[in-house]
Image (cartoon, rainbow, N blue to C red):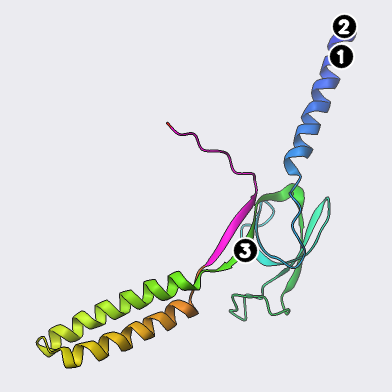
């Protein structure tokens, strides 16, 4: 009877230990832009990490009313419990080069084809229009570049090759 009670206590302690180990987040430097998914809120929390404690993350959330992609310092301060964190990602910046190339080629080629068809095959009209559309597309790609995120929690599982 005494052994059964000891086993039950040991099993309970192991479960508690496993639960706290799963909630421990890796250290993230304050000042970095983070994206948090939490079970306490349905929306993602995106902002600048102010501090990381054992039990919480202190984040300045970007102000959604301003429409800014980057925090201007006028956001709302949010405390997120580490126990509620489902995922944590750190920004790796924006990939402007791929946006410029993609949008520049897309706009340049599509407008160049349109100008070629409309001009009846005249290269005098087609080339300047194609270059202007490529420059405009490149500017759009630069302005609307997507932000890259690197997941730091939960740890990624290694993929198996079959």
Q: CA distance from mark 2 to mark 3?
A: 55 Å
Q: Nearer the viewer, mark 2 or mark 3?
A: 3
Q: Quadrant of residue 73?
A: bottom right
Taking the spot 77% from the left edge, 64% from the top edge, the residue there is 30
Q: Does the stretch in magenta take in 156?
A: yes
C-alpha separation, residue under disc 1 versus residue under disc 2: 6 Å
**Farthest residue toward the right?**
2
Q: Quadrant of residue 31?
A: bottom right
Dot 2 lies on which element? loop
Image height of 70 relative to 51, above or below: below
Q: Position of residue 70 (x, y in %)?
A: 63, 75
Query: Mark 2 and mark 1 in contact (Cβ < 8 Å)?
Result: yes
Taking the view exactly as shown, the residue that stands out farthest to the left is 120
Tell me where residue 56 appears, x and y as whole percent. 80, 55
Image spot of residue 19 (x, y percent): 75, 36
Looking at this view, is 5 or 148 the one in front?
Answer: 148
Disc 3: which residue: 91
Ranked by sequence position, the earlier of labels 2 and 3 is 2
**Which portion, as a residue range, is magenta?**
147-161
Residue 1 is labelled as 2
| Mark 2 residue crowding within 10 angstroms, few (<14) / some (14–19) / many (20+) | few
Number of numbered discs on residues:
3
Mark 3, Cα crowd under 10 Å, few <14 / some 14-19 / many 20+, is some
Query: What residue did someone put label 1 on?
Result: 5
């Amino acid at each position: 009877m005494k052994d059964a009670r000891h086993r039950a206590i040991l099993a309970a302690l192991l479960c508690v230990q496993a639960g706290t180990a799963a909630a421990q987040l890796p250290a993230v430097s304050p000042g970095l832009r983070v994206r948090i998914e939490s079970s306490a809120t349905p929306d993602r929390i995106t902002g600048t990490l102010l501090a990381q404690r054992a039990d919480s993350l202190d984040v300045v959330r970007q102000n959604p009313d301003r429409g800014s992609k980057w925090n201007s310092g006028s956001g709302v301060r949010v405390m997120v419990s580490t126990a509620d964190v489902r995922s944590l990602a750190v920004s790796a910046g924006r990939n402007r080069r791929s946006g410029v190339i993609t949008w520049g080629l897309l706009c340049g080629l599509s407008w160049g084809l349109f100008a070629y068809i409309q001009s009846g095959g005249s290269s005098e009209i087609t080339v300047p229009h194609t270059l202007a559309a490529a420059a405009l597309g490149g500017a759009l790609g630069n302005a609307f570049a997507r932000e890259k995120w690197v997941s730091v929690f939960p740890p990624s599982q290694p993929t198996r090759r079959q």
